[in-house]
Amino acid sequence: MPTEAESDTELAAVLRAKGMRMTAQRQLVLEAVRELGHATPEQIHERIRDQVEGVNITTVYRTLDLLEQLQLVSHTHLSHGAPTYHPAGDRGHAHLVCHRCGRITEVEPAVFANARQEVADKTGFVLDVGHVAVFGTCAECLEKAR
């Protein structure tokens, strides 16, 4: 994960290259995504709303859209609600989402290698397992249920 100074420099450079300017809101949203790991726009808003004036939920959504266009963040749908954002370089994993407690566990895409190959063999379709969420019940919740 980049340091705060590297994060500032990276965002500023990308924005400058696109003819845009660096703003406190843009920087705070990117930092919140990096610090939280996986976060909805609402969670990001909650994290930053008291740090700079004028940051409302609409600003967060617009900033996330911009950061995604700049390939600094990406999103995954981990539930029926809002998308969950994470740093763009963080796509090398799949998400296991517990229905009961909501815990998100990251696993290497290699875990799905057999399924990926089987789907490709049978349908010609290639799964993007770096952008997948699988729902089930985590080990802790299963243990509690026993």
Image (cartoon, rainbow, N blue to C red):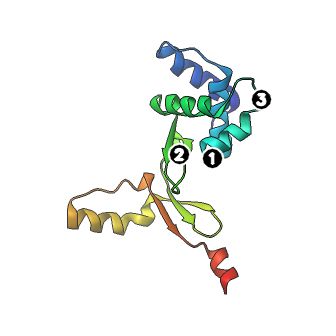
Q: In the image, is 113 to the left or to the right of 6?
A: left
Task: Give the answer, above or below, for where 116 lies relative to 30.
Answer: below
Q: In the image, is 50 to the left or to the right of 66?
A: right
State the image coordinates of residue 98 (x, y, percent, origin top left): 58, 67
Give the residue at x 48% y 15%.
17
Numbered tag placed on residue 90 in the rendering: 2
Mark 1 packing: few (<14 Cα in 10 Å), some, or many (20+)? Answer: few
Q: Quadrant of the N terminus?
A: top right
Task: Give the answer, above or below, for where 118 lies relative to 32.
Answer: below
Mark 3 packing: few (<14 Cα in 10 Å), some, or many (20+)? Answer: few
Q: Label 1 near label 2: C-beta < 8 Å?
A: yes
* Residue hosting label 3: 51
| Residue at disc 3, secondary structure | loop
Q: Amino acid at mark 2?
A: Asp
| Residue at disc 1, secondary structure | loop
Q: Amino acid at mark 3?
A: Gln
Q: Label 3 near label 2: C-beta < 8 Å?
A: no
State the image coordinates of residue 59 (x, y, percent, origin top left): 61, 28
Q: Quadrant of the C terminus?
A: bottom right
Mark 2 packing: few (<14 Cα in 10 Å), some, or many (20+)? Answer: some
Q: Comparing marks 2 and 1, which lies closer to the viewer? A: 1
Nearer-N-terminus badge (2/1): 1
Give the residue at x 62% y 70%.
100
Give the residue at x 55% y 43%.
85
Q: In the image, is 63 to the left or to the right of 3?
A: left
* Residue hosting label 1: 37
Nearer-N-terminus badge (2/3): 3
- Residue nearer the viewer, 135 or 139: 135
Nearer-N-terminus badge (3/1): 1
